[in-house]
Image (tube, rainbow, N blue to C red):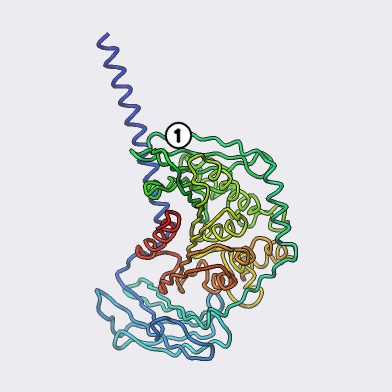
Amino acid sequence: MIYNKLSYILAFNQTLLMKRILNYRWLLYALLISVSLQAQPTERYIKVIVAPDRDNWTYKTGENVRFTITVLKNGNPVRDVKVNYEIGPEKMDADKKSSAVLSKGATTIDGGTMKSPGFLRCVATVMVDGQEYRGLATAGFDPQNLTPTVENPSDFTRFWEDAKKEAEKIPMDAEMTLIPERCTEKINVYQVSLQNFRNRSRIYGILCMPKKDGKYPALLKVPGAGIRPYSGDVVTAELGIITLEIGIHGIPVTLDPEVYADLGAGALNNYQQFNLDHRDRYYYKRVYLGCVRANDFLVSLPQFDGVNLGVSGGSQGGALSIITAGLDPRVKYLAAYYPALSDMTGYLKGRAGGWPHMFDKNNLPYNDLKEKQETIKYYDVVNFARQVKIPGYYSWGFNDETCPPTSMYAAYNVITAPRELYLALETGHWTYPEQRDEFNKWITGKLLGN
């Protein structure tokens, strides 16, 4: 009897330990993914610093910009190093390529100007001890006057209203599965599965719900590009906000990390361009409607306060935040980092277009089809931004090489609703802690009425 009890206790403890190990493994993976998504630049021994000659990096068209290039080692200038640099409109072929020897560790060069609104970028590289180091800076020329290149179809609104009506006919069939090991003293954590779109497609996410009885605002968190698991936002939930962090690919978001790696390298590789030649079959139609379906679920919760619904995300998630706000009048606030999928046709007009750059010189040979260029008009962030009627908070930097500021301003400039823009000029496709703090403070403050 004692032996049996002891065996049971040992088996139970072993099972518990294995669960904890697996959970820690998963959380470590999620943490690594989160860090990689921020694309935080690695600190390097040699630093190549490029800066325009104005504090705000902004000029009027026709004004000249001068770029200063400095190379530092241990905080001190590296003398007599050769720097190669090129200058031109962001994401386009350089107009000027040259080099200089930094006799004093720095040099200032004439960057020229732009005759129309846009962004002029200087990229500098040096070789030190056999290693290449790179830096860049981007000057904006009347960015507030940038206008979109993408056309707004006359039936854009009708197309999406019809799509929403079709999706409304599909039962939500919500399933909630408690994840005990992720729950905290104050928060219950669930994996949620919702029926979405057609052909039995589903959308999955992680719901974090305050345990205390009451009515709460809700925040939909939409994802950046890629295929990965999700951990949910317990921190925001502990402030008194229901959070739902969703994936977009119709697969559970709590699987083994290797599953997502295999899908990303295989079946879902380059999903952004699946069925681009047909506006009703394009991959993102199910995704956009899935965001609305996620809101259907949030507003159906008895704990929801019935009014305060927000949406936030970065990159692809920044795009989905604007898109969801444009599609769903129940959303009251949006917050978006460096929105992708913005003014994607820019390359067809001789300037930078938004991620995923489907019409740049590398992808144009595959996408130079009328059908694809027609489809994209119905999915570009710009045309959803025109429909945004709620307060929004936006943030990006001028050095973003993934989501060019040209494309982001093209979307931002058509928004007529109240808006705030936090510029962290030297950031690329990443954020400073202060930037994230202000972003989170804005959206949570709005939802909580602070």
The x, y position of residue 181, in whole percent, is: 37, 35
Q: Mark 1 — residue?
A: 178
207 to the left or right of 415? left
Residue at 43% x, 70% y is 422
Total numbered labels: 1
In the picture, residue 107 is in which quadrant?
Answer: bottom left
The x, y position of residue 25, in whole percent, is: 37, 41
Residue at 46% x, 40% y is 256
Q: Is residue 433 above or below residue 94?
A: above
Dot 1 surroundings within 10 Å: few (below 14), some, or many (20 or more)? some
- Quadrant into which the C terminus falls: bottom left
The x, y position of residue 165, in whole percent, is: 70, 48
For the residue marked with disc 1, what is the amino acid?
Answer: Leu
Q: Is residue 229 above or below residue 275?
A: above
86 to the left or right of 153? left
- Quadrant into which the N terminus falls: top left
The x, y position of residue 382, in whole percent, is: 61, 67
